[in-house]
Image (cartoon, rainbow, N blue to C red):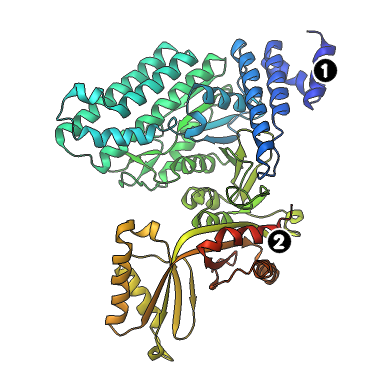
Amino acid sequence: MNCNACVRRVRVCGRSARALAAHADAIGALAVTRVRDTVVMALARASTVTHRVGARARDARAGAATRRGFVRARALADATSCATPGAGLAQHSVVMKFGGSSVADAERMREVATIVMSFPEEMPVLVLSAMGKTTNNLLMAGELALGCGGDSNLIEALTPLVAVRKLHEDTMETLGTDAATRAEVRALLKKLEQVCTGVSLMQECTSRTRALLVSFGERMSTRIFASYLRSIGVSAEQVDTTDDLFVTDDVFENGAILDETYEKTKARLTLKPGQGPVVRVVTGFLGRGIKTGAICTLGRGGSDLTATVIGKALGLREVQVWKDVDGVLSADPREVEGTVPMPFLSFQEATELAYFGAQVLHPHSMRPAMDSGKLNVRVKNSYNIRAPGTVIGHRRAEELHKDWLLTSIVRKKNVTMLDITSTRMLGQYGFLAKVFSIMASNGISVDVVATSEVSVSLTLDPSKLWERDLAKEELEKLKQDFENDGIANVAVSSGHSIISLIGNVERNNEIMERAFRALGAKQIKVKMVSQGASKTNISLLVDDSQGADAARAIHAEFFPM
C-alpha cells in the first residue's frame, strides 16, 4: 500500500494524514493501520441509526447495516494483529462498562472488541457482566441442587449448569481461547459444581452461597474476553475485584462499598512508570466482605457501580455505559413515537427518572460520580458507536441550559392512591406524623404525596411492596389501622398511572401550562398533582387507561415530530 492510498483512506475516515502517520509510527505496523481504517470506515457506514426511535423500519435497516459493519470489521481484525489502544498515554483514560447482553456469546464479544479498538486514542478499563442469562442460571442451579440429594451425577446434569457449561465452552472454542485460560475457566466450572454439591448436602442455599454462585459468571466472562483481546494482539489483563480491590460490608447480596476500596483500586490499576498501554478487563458486580472475607455482590446496578467506583478512584472524567439505545430517551419508545435522545442529564434528573421507572443507571451506582465533583457518566449505543449518547453530569453547559425545558417523560403504571381525610385534625399538629407512622409500621414506602390541612393524598406501587395475591389484604389492614384508631377515613383506589415530567425548575410554570393544555385537548383528567422536593420533577396522576395517551400527548407538545 503506497502513501497516496493511505492518505486517501485517511480522508474517507475523516482523519488527518498527519494523525494517522503519527499513530502508525507509534504502533510501528502498517498492517494495523489498515485494520483500524477498515474498522472505522465500516462502523461509520453502519452508524446511520436515526435518532427518531419511533421510525422502526429505518432503525431495523440501520441495525442490520451495523451488524454487517461489525462482521466486515471483525473478519479483518481477526486476520491481522491489532495494536493496544492508548498508545502514548501514561494511564487509563476511560472506563467502559458492557452488560450481559453485550457479551452474551462469542459474536457479541467480538463486537465489543471492535468497539474498544475503534477508539485508539483511549486506554480503557473494561467492566463486564456475566454472559447473557448466566446469572439467572447460576441462581436457578443453586435452588435445583437442593433437590438432588447430594448426587453429583444429578447435579452435573442440572439444566442450568449444562447451559452455563455449554455457553462458556462454545464461546472459548469459537474465540480460540488460549490453553491457560481454558484451564482457569474449566477449574471455575468444576468449583461451581462443587458449590452446588455442597448446597445439596447441606440442604440450604444461604445469601452467602448465592453471592458465591453468581460470582462465577463475571469471573469466567472477563477471563474469556481478556484472552480474546490478547489473541488479536492487544495487551490485556484480567482483574478480579474480589482480589483485594473492592472491600464491602458483609451484606452478601447487597454489599456497600467501603472507603478503602478507592485507595486499593487506585494502587492496583495505576500503571507503573514506563509501563506500556494495557487494557484491564475487570469483573463487575463483585466485592469481598471486610470481616468474613466472603464474596459479596453489590446489589442492583452493581456493574454500573463498579465502573463509577473505578472512575472515581482513578480520577477520570468519564465512565461510559454501553447499551442498545442512543442514550437516555425523551420517553418510552414502546409507548411513544418520535422519542429523541437527550444530550445531557444532571445526576438529580437521572435519579428521578430511575426512581419513576426509566431505564437509566440505578441511583446508587451514580453516587461515586456525584461525589467525585468531575466524573461524568455517558450512556452510549453499542449499535451506533459514533452517536454522542447522553452525558449524565454535574452542570449543563450554558448553550444547552438556555433552551432547556423538558428532559423526559416517564410513566409508572398500576399505581394505587390513598385519600386520607380527618376533619378532627383541623388546626392540630401531628397529622402527617401519625399518617407516616402508620405507613412505617406496615413497612410501606410512598411514591408521591399531596397534602392539605386535613387531608393527604399519596400513591403506592403494589408491584414493589406486596405479592399480587396479598395486595387487597394488605390494603385493608392499612385502612383499618387508620380508621380503628380514629385518626382518619381512608379511600383506596387503584388502576392509576403517574406521569412524571423531569425538567427545568426555572420554567415550571411553562411546563405545567403546556402539559395541562395538551391533556385537556385529549380530555384526560388529572386526579393529583405533586412537585418533588428536588424541584426537577412534576408528577401527574391519571387513570391507567389514559396513561399511554397522556404520555403521548405531553410528548407531542414538547417534542413535536
- Determine the secondary structure under disc 1: helix
Residue 431: image x %, image y %?
Answer: 39, 83
Extreme residue in the right direction: 4
Q: Gap between marks 2 and 1, in whole Å?
A: 48 Å
Residue at the image position 59 percent from the left and 35 percent from the top: 94
CB under 8 Å between discs 2 and 1: no
Q: Position of residue 495 (x, y in %)?
A: 45, 64
Query: Along the horizontal axis of the image, is 144 left or right of 507?
Result: left
Identified at 23% across, 26% down, the residue is 155
Q: Earlier in the sequence, mark 2 or mark 1?
A: 1
Mark 2 burial class by Cα count in 10 Å: few <14, some 14-19, many 20+: some
Say above or below: 233 vs 508. above
Quadrant of the frame with the N terminus: top right
Q: Which mark is residue 7?
A: 1
Task: Quadrant for residue 540, please give it.
Answer: bottom right
Q: Is residue 481 visible?
A: yes
Q: Secondary structure at mark 2?
A: helix
Image location of residue 184, percent across then percent down = 36, 19
**Looking at the rendering, which quadrant does residue 475 occupy?**
bottom left
- Return the x and y of residue 522 as percentages of the image width and height: 65, 66
| 422 lies above or below 380 | below
Instruction: Inspect this view and state whether residue 119 appears.
Output: no
Viewer-closest of 453 and 276: 453
Mark 2, residue position: 557
Residues 225 and 531: in front is 531
Q: Amino acid at mark 1?
A: Val
Q: What residue is at 68 percent from the left and 55 percent from the top?
A: 396
User: In the displayed structure, would residue 448 be above or below residue 53?
Assistant: below
